[in-house]
Image (cartoon, rainbow, N blue to C red):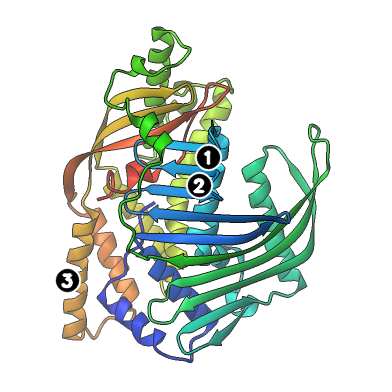
Amino acid sequence: MGKVMWFLFSVSVLLLAACSDNASVEDVFEWGIEAHEAVESMQLETEGTTESIDIQWVAQMDLNEGVYSIVYDEYLEVYKDNELVIGMIDEDELDENSIGFLIEKVINEYEYVLKRFDHYVEDVNEAFELEVEEEHYVLTYIGDDEQQQHLADQLANDSMENIFDDIEIVAVGIEQLEFTLTIDKETNLVDTFEQQVSLEIQFDSEWLLDDHLVFDEHLTTTYTQYNAIDEIERPVQAESASAGLDDDAMSVSVDLSEEEVEVIEEEAATYVDALIQATVFQNVDGFGETVAGSRSDDKKQADGEFQRDSFVEFYRQNTRRNMGDLVRDELIDELADSYMNALSQTTYEVVDSQLMDEEQIIVTLSITGLFDSLIMYEIEQDLTEAIELGEEDVDNWLEYQVELMIDAYNGPFVEAETTEATVHVLRESDGAYHVLMQDEYLLGGFVQ
């Protein structure tokens, strides 16, 4: 969802604080999370062992454009942009679940590594040790037995959810759980992330032969090219797969009749429409009856309600994590409500749906979104003026900033230019549909 933007006052305070060698672990986490929220592009290089197998992969990410390229040991490649998601292992195409897993793993575990630990760990000051070097902050995980078990349980749950459905974890044994983050003092951006993790996950399943899984990774990730990534090149397979984007859908080679293609394209468009209603407009009326798939209407309706609730909760929790204890919870809740009020005044239209293959459909939207960057610019001007005038009745400048945001979002709608967004939709084996990245229609679409 949209990033929380910090302005001149808060940024200057953070920069001044960052110059101090008296920083706490919590300070470094806060500065690092804020710095990473502003990153537009970066490259990650990871090497080490997974299950004792040597691995090496490179990921390039253009966060503004939503373009991801991940190459594993030159034999496995995953690529995603606003028009296409494709994965190849040697010369064979990966299924959508594997593609989604690999992309989400990089985004969740590496792109937002500091935010991830801040979310998992109850008190970072207790769980991490800070060493201040001449050019770097070094954070080392030192959680006690109870903290380690809590963290291991969450890591195991994440891993199993990404790989299997309907698996009940019985116990998680810890052999090794070590993490070290090196952060540049000048930029507050992560330089390296080292992890040595060995877990034995015991689970209960009626259909898996084994009842345990050994999770073993010893990896070092180096972060480079912050905001310096050139245009990410599509792999040859992706160029070939996207060549027919502007052609008639029936030019795609699929073993389907024209009528079946039309049905799939219509169902994908309907799903995107229903998903936008559930998330951006908080409307799930008839969601279960509208979207396709073999599950019951009640289960599909429950999914729509989950999308509705988690959309707002993600914004709320993301804001709360970034602002810490500096802003009251009730004010953050009010900000979330006002933000959704502003989004509810946006408009959109589904203008096209095109089948790429039996599992991939591109849905094109025309969106007149919220001109959020202009709102934030004007708030920055108001905030700067108030600071320069030395407003005596302001006790908490961050809360003052949030109040300005609330007033703006509840005020007259600030309309952005109408733009097009393409949404990549995956069709599952049961006839249900899934959108891998909601940012495809949110950032640069409903929020500009």
x, y percentage for residue 71?
Answer: 50, 49
Q: Which is more toward the observer, 185 or 276?
A: 185
Q: CA distance from mark 2 to mark 1?
A: 6 Å
Name the spot of residue 297 as percent of width and height, x first: 54, 23
Q: Quadrant of residue 168?
A: top right
Q: Is residue 286 visible?
A: yes
Q: Check the image and report above or below for 66 versus 352.
A: below
Measure how far apart labels 3 and 2 are at the Cα level.
Answer: 38 Å
Q: Amino acid at mark 2?
A: Ile
Q: Are marks 2 and 1 in contact (CB under 8 Å)?
A: yes
**Residue at numbered disc 3:** 381
Can you identify the residue that label 2 sits on? 103
Q: Indicate the secondary structure of the residue bearing disc 3.
A: helix
The tag on residue 283 is none
Q: Quadrant of residue 440?
A: top left
Amino acid at the residue labelled 1: Ile
Q: Earlier in the sequence, mark 3 or mark 1?
A: 1
Drawn side of residue 117 relative to residue 358, left or right:
right
Q: Which element type, helix, strand or loop, lies under badge 2?
A: helix
- Residue 6 is situated, as x and y percent measured from the top left of the image, at 31, 69
Q: Residue at x 31, y 27 (%)?
A: 245
Q: Which mark is residue 99?
A: 1
Q: Residue 23 vs residue 379: left or right?
A: right
